[in-house]
Image (cartoon, rainbow, N blue to C red):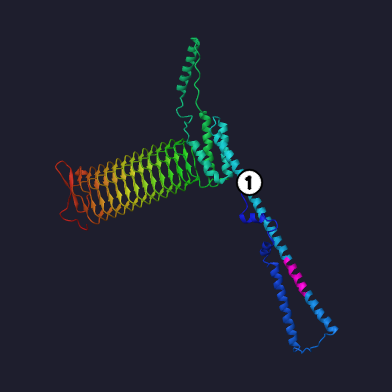
């Protein structure tokens, strides 16, 4: 890109002598010569008059005798005075002229220096622009060549293109995001890993035998021998290596301590196919892995996502680890599929974390995770163990309709906002021991198939277990309910213990059913308890009803809770 000199500089460069005499005098701050000499003459005459007047005043203004003719000596004195005055005026003119000549010379010298400086600066700008233009052309050439090489059917050429792009990104920070976009676009291209759909040993042996028999029959019948099947496109094994190189480029330069760290980079790997992908300890701005297939083990441990992150519909085929990952923006894993073991241990979600409809085929660990925003796991499914021990939910937590097929733990978890487990299904042992619910807790119509423990849990606001089903033994021993509590229509199939539980608000077990032992020993009900229509399956089980209530047997051995006519002492 060329550049011209500024307008003022062009004017000065177009006038080698600095312009006309009047312009030069004006630039030097001088009057025109006529005005200067006139002012100098008038000033000299005025000064001479003042001096002569002062001398006469000192002499007392002596009286001059009038004579008809001056003596020769006086005439010579007058002549000398006139000549001296003329000489003084001439000297004054010479002095003014010399001063003006000096000032004009200095102004011309300053003008020449300014012109030289402007010319030098202009030349330097031209040189810089030329250098910049040459560098831009070189970058463009390399960029276009690398982009063309990525389309080659030869793996070494594609590898060369990737390393060329890497060098360009290292040397030109302003081009890094564009180059990352190219690498991501390459990884988004349709691709089938070489191990996908590969024949097993027996199938491969039968296929070779089939082709050999076809060649034999063709030779026997004098027909053309069938050609061997040719693979279309790049060799899948070579392409696999090229794609692994592309992944390594991203992993290497997104590390904060990398020699050439690529900062503030966003990744768009939507619908890409990645193998053994890792971003361990990397820092990424925005990241989009929606509907991405991540084959093999995947590692994001210690990574930081500064912006929004999307894994909607992503498929994780191997073990997956997001241990101690920081999600500063919104994190979406809606309908993601995790086929292997999954770890989010110690991860931090600053805004909403969306796992709605996600499926976890093996053990899922969310221990010690911090959810600062909403945590949404509605309709998610956990086929193996799920652990949320010591996890902190600062916002609302939604697990409504979630399916837990094996043992589930929320031991010592803290729920600061409202919590929903309505309609959730817990098929294994379930542990909420020591959990703290600061907001409302809703477990309406939840199903607990095996042993369930809420021992030591605290419910600071309302807790609702309406029509919940507890198929195994259930413990609420030592639990504290500060708000209203609702167990209306709940079904307890195993033994149930509310030993030393504290209920500070209104508590209702209306129409609840207890198939095993119902034990309320030592339970405290600050606002009373309503057991209307609650029933036990066998009165002989040794039930311990709440204070002021008793179990009244029926003819079939069942029993119902009825209020004592006489209050118990101290109740």
Left/right placement of residue 223 relative to residue 453 reads right
Q: Is residue 499 visible?
A: no
Give the residue at the far right of this rendering: 72
The one of 97 and 201 positioned closer to us in this rendering: 97
Q: Is residue 252 visible?
A: yes
* Image position of 42 with respect to 468: above or below: below
- Mark 1: give few (<14), some (14-19) or many (20+) Cα within 10 Å: some
Q: Which residues are magenta?
A: 88-100
* Image position of 281 with respect to 14: above or below: above
Where residue 78 sits in the image (x, y, percent)?
Answer: 81, 81
Where residue 460 sits in the image (x, y, percent)?
Answer: 31, 54
Where residue 180 sits in the image (x, y, percent)?
Answer: 52, 41
Left/right placement of residue 460 relative to residue 343 reads left
Give the residue at the far left of this rendering: 555
Residue at (66%, 50%) from the top-left corner?
123
Q: Secondary structure at mark 1?
A: helix
Left/right placement of residue 108 relative to residue 362 reads right
Where residue 513 sits in the image (x, y, percent)?
Answer: 22, 44
Instruction: Please tell me whether residue 98 belongs to the stretch shown in magenta.
Output: yes
The one of 340 and 267 positioned closer to us in this rendering: 267
State whether the magenta stretch is mostly helix, strand or loop: helix
Q: What residue would you read off at disc 1?
A: 130
């Amino acid at each position: 890109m060329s550049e011209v000199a500024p307008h003022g500089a062009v004017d000065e460069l177009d006038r080698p002598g600095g312009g006309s005499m009047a312009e030069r005098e004006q630039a030097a701050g001088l009057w025109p010569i006529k005005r200067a000499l006139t002012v100098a003459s008038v000033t000299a005459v005025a000064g001479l008059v003042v001096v002569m007047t002062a001398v006469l005043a000192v002499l007392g203004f002596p009286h001059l005798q009038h004579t008809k003719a001056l003596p020769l000596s006086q005439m010579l004195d007058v002549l000398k005075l006139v000549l001296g005055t003329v000489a003084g005026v001439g000297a004054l003119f010479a002095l003014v002229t010399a001063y003006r000549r000096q000032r004009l010379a200095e102004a011309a010298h300053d003008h020449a220096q300014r012109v030289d400086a402007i010319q030098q600066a202009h030349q330097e700008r031209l040189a810089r622009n030329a250098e910049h233009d040459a560098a831009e052309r070189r970058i463009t050439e390399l960029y276009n060549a690398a982009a063309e090489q990525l389309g080659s059917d030869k793996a070494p050429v594609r590898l060369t293109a990737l390393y060329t792009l890497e060098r360009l990104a290292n040397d030109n920070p302003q081009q890094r995001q564009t180059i990352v976009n190219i690498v991501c676009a390459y990884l988004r291209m349709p691709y089938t890993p070489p191990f996908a759909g590969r024949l097993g040993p027996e199938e491969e042996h039968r296929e070779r035998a089939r082709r050999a028999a076809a060649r034999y029959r063709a030779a026997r019948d004098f027909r053309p021998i069938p050609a061997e099947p040719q693979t279309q496109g790049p060799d899948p094994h070579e392409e696999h290596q090229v794609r692994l190189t592309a992944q390594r480029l991203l992993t290497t330069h997104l590390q904060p301590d990398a020699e050439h760290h690529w900062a503030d980079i966003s990744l768009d790997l939507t619908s890409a196919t990645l193998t053994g992908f890792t971003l361990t300890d990397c820092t990424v701005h925005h990241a989009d892995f929606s509907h991405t297939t991540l084959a093999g083990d995947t590692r994001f441990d210690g990574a930081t996502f500064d912006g929004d992150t999307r894994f909607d519909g992503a498929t994780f085929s191997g073990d997956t680890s997001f241990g101690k990952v920081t999600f500063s923006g919104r994190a979406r894993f809606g309908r993601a599929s995790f086929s292997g073991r999954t770890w989010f241990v110690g991860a931090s979600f600053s805004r909403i974390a969306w796992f709605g409809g996600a499926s976890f085929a093996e053990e899922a660990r969310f221990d010690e995770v911090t959810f600062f925003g909403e945590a949404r796991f509605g309709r998610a499914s956990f086929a193996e163990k799920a652990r949320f021990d010591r996890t902190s939910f600062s916002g609302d937590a939604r697990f409504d309709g979630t399916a837990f097929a094996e043992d589930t733990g929320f031991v010592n978890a803290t729920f600061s906002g409202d919590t929903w487990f309505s309609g959730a299904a817990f098929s294994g042992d379930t542990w909420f021991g020591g959990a703290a619910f600061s907001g409302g807790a809703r477990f309406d119509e939840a199903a607990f198939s095996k042993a369930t423990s809420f021992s030591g849990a605290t419910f600071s606001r309302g807790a609702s277990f309406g029509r919940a089903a507890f198929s195994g033994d259930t413990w609420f021993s030592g639990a504290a309910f500060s708000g209203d509590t609702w167990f209306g229509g709940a079904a307890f199939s195993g033994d149930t213990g509310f030993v030393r539980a504290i209920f500070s608000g209104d508590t209702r077990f209306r129409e609840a059913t207890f198939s095993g032992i119902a034990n309320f020993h030592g339970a405290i009900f600050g606002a009373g308890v309503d057991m209307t229509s609650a029933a036990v399956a066998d009165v002989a089980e040794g039930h311990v009803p709440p204070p002021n209530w008793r179990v009244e047997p029926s003819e079939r051995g069942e029993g119902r809770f009825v209020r004592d006519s006489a209050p118990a002492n101290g109740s």
